[in-house]
Amino acid sequence: MSENVNKSINECDPFAAADFIRSKISFDPFFGIVLGSGLGGLADEIKVTDRISYSDIPGFPKSTVEGHKGEYIFGYLDEVPVILMNGRVHFYEGYPMQQVVTPVRVMALLGAKNIFLTNASGGLNRSYKPGTLMCINDHITSFIPSPLLGPNDDRLSTRFPAMSQVYDREYMAVMHKVADGLGIPLEDGVYLQVTGPAFESPAESRAYAMLGADAVGMSTACEAVVLCAMGVRLLGLSCVTDMAIDNEDIEVTHEEVQAVANQAGTKLIQIVRNTVSSIYRGL
Ligand code: HPA
């Protein structure tokens, strides 16, 4: 059993994946960016220099979900060198958490010292509505297995990393300034990650709201944990696509989540773009 666990973790060795990519591409990224469901439009704004499909990387997990592509895009967002993860894998697809976080670890190993995580989420804060954008200022991971379980790899992080400031305060201030400048309302809130794939029951949503979460989703926080442990400076931006709270009479669907994310996506993209560029220029 433990042999199998270790085998499945090692099959997805982020160092081997980073070496493989470096053998194909020479690129020095300033920012890594993860695109959530329906938010892939940012990929069209990139002056692309290279693409690598996850399926070409030995041992890499492959996204199985409609609306989630699976590739790295290397290129320039305005003048900023970036790696984009166009699609991610999720725990609910059946991959162990250690594999779910491999693609973001690889971005950090390729040199991205700053990473911008985006996602679609369900609103728990009753003042939100579909289309609300939320700067993630903290998270709750108590309902998912930690991606740091198992033997510790000291090359990646210490055994007991602190999580007192996962999302970078200075960068969050830049994001808010950018949103204000663009005239785009931006909330600040706590993101709670669940395993999914079922959406929340009304009682679950009420429970999560009582715990202090403003939005709920099925990704991101696990990535933030391993990246914070690696010392990466992080930003998180969530597009609230539906209200998970008070949902007794409404049935949310994946299609609706994608449709709202696509609509709000243009605003999200503007915020990501200008924030990355402001940070790059040292503003
Ligand atoms: N719940 C969980 N994840 C989600 C939701 C939701 O309501 N919307 C988009 N992702």
Image (spheres, helix red, strand yellow):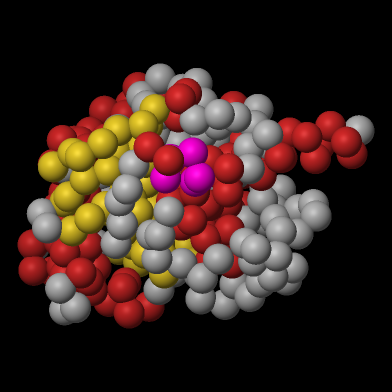
Quadrant of the image occupied by residue 38: top left
| Quarter placement of the C terminus | bottom left
Which residue is more in the foreground, 214 or 72?
A: 72
The residue lying at 39 percent from left, 53 percent from top is: 117
**Residue 8 position (above or below residue 167):** above
Res. 158 visible in picture: yes
Q: Quadrant of residue 11?
A: top right
Tell me which secondary structure the magenta stretch mostly adopts.
helix
Task: Reply above or below: 33 against 59.
Answer: below
Q: Position of residue 90 (x, y in %)?
A: 55, 35
At 20% from the left and 39% from the top, the residue drawn is 49
Image position of 267 with respect to 59: above or below? below
View extreme (front): residue: 23
In this rendering, would 187 be left or right of 126?
left
Where residue 192 appears, as percent x and y from the top left, is: 54, 54
Q: State yes or no: residue 11 in magenta.
A: no
Instruction: Please tell me which residue lies in front, 14 or 117.
Output: 14
Magenta residue span: 18-22
Quadrant of the image for the N terminus?
top right
Residue 235 picture location, percent across and down: 37, 63
Residue at figure coordinates x 38%, y 78% from the top left: 169
The correct choice, above or below, for 199 with respect to 246 in the image is above
Query: Is 21 left, or right, of 97 in this rendering?
Result: left
Where is residue 213? Give x, y as percent: 51, 59
Find the residue positioned furthest to the right. 1
- Name which residue lies at 26% across and 36% down: 50
